[in-house]
Amino acid sequence: MAPKTVWLDGEFLSYAQAGIPPLSHSIAYASTIYEGMRSYSGHIFMLSDHLVRLRKSAAIFMHSVLYSDDQLAEICYELLKRNMLNDGYVKILVFYDDGDNSFAARNCSSRVLVAALPAPIVRPVEKWKLVISSWRRPPPNCHPYGAKTSSTYALSFLSHRPRPSWADDVLFLCTEGKVCEASGSNIFFVKGKKLVTPTTATALAGITRQLVIDQLAKKCGFDVEIRDVDADEIALFDGAFLCGTAVEIKEVGQIGDVLFAESNISTKLSEALAAAVRSESERAAFIADA
Ligand code: PMP
């Protein structure tokens, strides 16, 4: 659904007014970087972490973002208000315009678009089934994994077309047969009291993943191990879950032929995530009132 109002390079515009040049470099050459953030009851969760990642992605793609973090934060909140959204999904996209029609983009300028959308609708099944994608993720020296960039999603898009009807999402392996991540979220495996998650060599450094590592796992009584996970190992784990801004925490019941038994770890982690959202919102409200 199109938002009523968006923000483009300094102006609040209706969606229809925000005409983006059809020959923009980023449309043809996948040079957009972006962030997707979640607002809960009007509070944008982990906004500053998303802005840090936006700057990192911008640096990798040599974008200049001329707006400060405070300005971007203000625009995000203003858009939530103008679009009458409390629980929403806010996107900041930085893309190259049509200053030049070659991939080198020497005369292109970075443009910044911010949009507030309704909260994402994720498949409402309790335990997701993952199919292993026939597309493999390229090695780290063949793709800029340090950036959250539109180019990553070429494989996400292709891996869903077609995707078997029984599967809720796909799991990517790299060319060496190691687990990377799902099409729009990171993965953790469960083994006893330990969570195991792949490195970010061929996966996005997810903000939710980092929150699980830094805080949520401990709150739920788990240690975390970050290491390569071979596809052959999947069957040896007790369970798995996905995490990300849109999917939050999603238990995985099946990966390919491997079925995982019922576990309550994802429920516990979902509760821990909800508590983290509440406590950050309360802290922000306290600071605003002080
Ligand atoms: N991996 C991919 C490919 C993603 O698109 C996302 C969603 N942004 C994630 C992981 C999870 O990242 P985050 O927790 O920052 O949303």
Image (tube, rainbow, N blue to C red):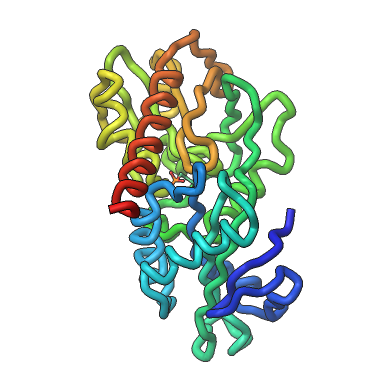
User: Could you say where residue 188 lies in the image, as x and y percent from the top left?
Assistant: 39, 29
Task: Tell me: residue 215, above or below residue 118.
Answer: above
Q: Of 79 and 2, which appears nearest the observer?
A: 79
Instruction: Give residue 55's quadrant in the image.
Output: bottom left
270 left or right of 290 in image: right
Residue at figure coordinates x 40%, y 17% from the top left: 265
Residue at figure coordinates x 38%, y 46% from the top left: 207
User: Could you say where residue 176 lies in the image, as x and y percent from the top left?
Assistant: 42, 40
User: Could you say where residue 2 lies in the image, as x and y percent from the top left?
Assistant: 73, 58
Task: Tell me: residue 236, above or below residue 137.
Answer: above
Task: Tell me: residue 82, above or below residue 167.
Answer: below
Q: Of 214 and 282, which appears nearest the observer?
A: 282
Give the tally of numbered discs: 0
Q: Note whether residue 277 is visible.
A: yes
Residue at figure coordinates x 49%, y 88% from the top left: 106
User: Could you say where residue 77 lies in the image, as x and y percent from the top left?
Assistant: 50, 59
Residue at figure coordinates x 54%, y 78% from the top left: 111
Residue at the outermost top position: 261
